[in-house]
Amino acid sequence: MKKNLKIKNNISELDKLVIFIEKMAEDWKIPVKEVFSINLVLEEIISNIIFYAFDDKFDHEIHLEADYNNNILKIMIEEEGKEFNILKVPLPDHLDTGVENRKVGGLGIHLITTIMDKIEYKRTGDKNQTFLYKKI
Amino acid sequence: MEIKEQKIKDVIVLEILGRVDTTNYGKLEGVLSDYIAKNEKNIIIDCSEMDYISSSGLRVFLTGFKKINAINGNYFLCGLQDNIQEIFEISGFTSIFKIFTNQENALKGIE
């Protein structure tokens, strides 16, 4: 049974994401450790959409669809923002450089690609669709 | 998230309770930068009651460390829960930060 969540592009909507993930974890019996990292990944992607995907001041909808089959969790995130292919975001150069040289950005994308097993991107019409897969 | 603030001799101890995420990381950022602006050089962040951190929260941890490091201060973390420890490892933070098992050991580390 797929689960759906629709939220608006407002940072206060992130609370709904937390509740959605908790419910998903409960129904599909996903271990706490995985819930933690999935929460981190989704928060990163959704907050990025909220901050950067839309230039106007209107409300926009962000749609999440989650599915769990054969121990694979699949999550699709869909919105009508600017074209944004997560696969083309550059990774940080050196994670282990000294603190003086350590850049503050780039961390989010590194976490997402490390935590998830597979990521796909599709631009369909005026929609961005990002698919995340993780074996639980 | 709640932040408990203490001063033990010349050390500022910040205990984080709950979640550090995109909606509230600014609070931690503010508390940290206020102490740094007051020339506090020794900061311990006790994470034993912190059960979630997003990448925006991780950035605050790193920025604080860079500022304290620039003035040759001590910036120690302690009590990381397993899930948090793993995220710190993935982020490359475990090789940068001095991390102690608990507050007592972190305080000894500064003495």
Image (cartoon, coloured by chain):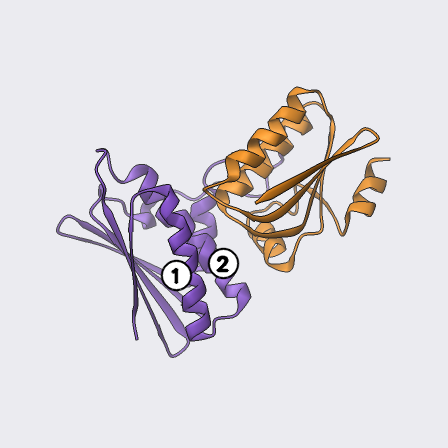
Give the colour in which the image draws chain A.
purple
Chain given the colour orange: B
Residue at 45% x, 56% y is A39
Closer to the camera in the image, B50 or B109: B50
x, y percent for residue A106 = 45, 40
Left-right relation of B71 to A40: right
Crowding at mark 1 (Cα within 10 Å: few <14, some 14-19, many 20+): some
Q: Which residue is mark 1?
A: A20
Residue B107, above or below A21: above
Q: Which residue in the rendered view is the most extreme toward the top?
A: B38
Q: Which residue is mark 2?
A: A37
Disc 1: which chain? Answer: A
Quadrant placement of the C terminus of chain B: top right
Crowding at mark 2 (Cα within 10 Å: few <14, some 14-19, many 20+): many
Q: Tell me, for residue A62, which label it has, or none.
A: none
Corner quadrant of residue A73: bottom left
Q: Is residue A100 visible?
A: no
Q: As shown in the figure, which amino acid type bears the numbered disc 1?
A: Phe
x, y percent for residue A121 = 27, 55
Observer-side mark, 2 or 1, equals 1
Quadrant placement of the N terminus of chain B: top right
x, y percent for residue B16 = 64, 44
Residue at 74% x, 26% y is B41
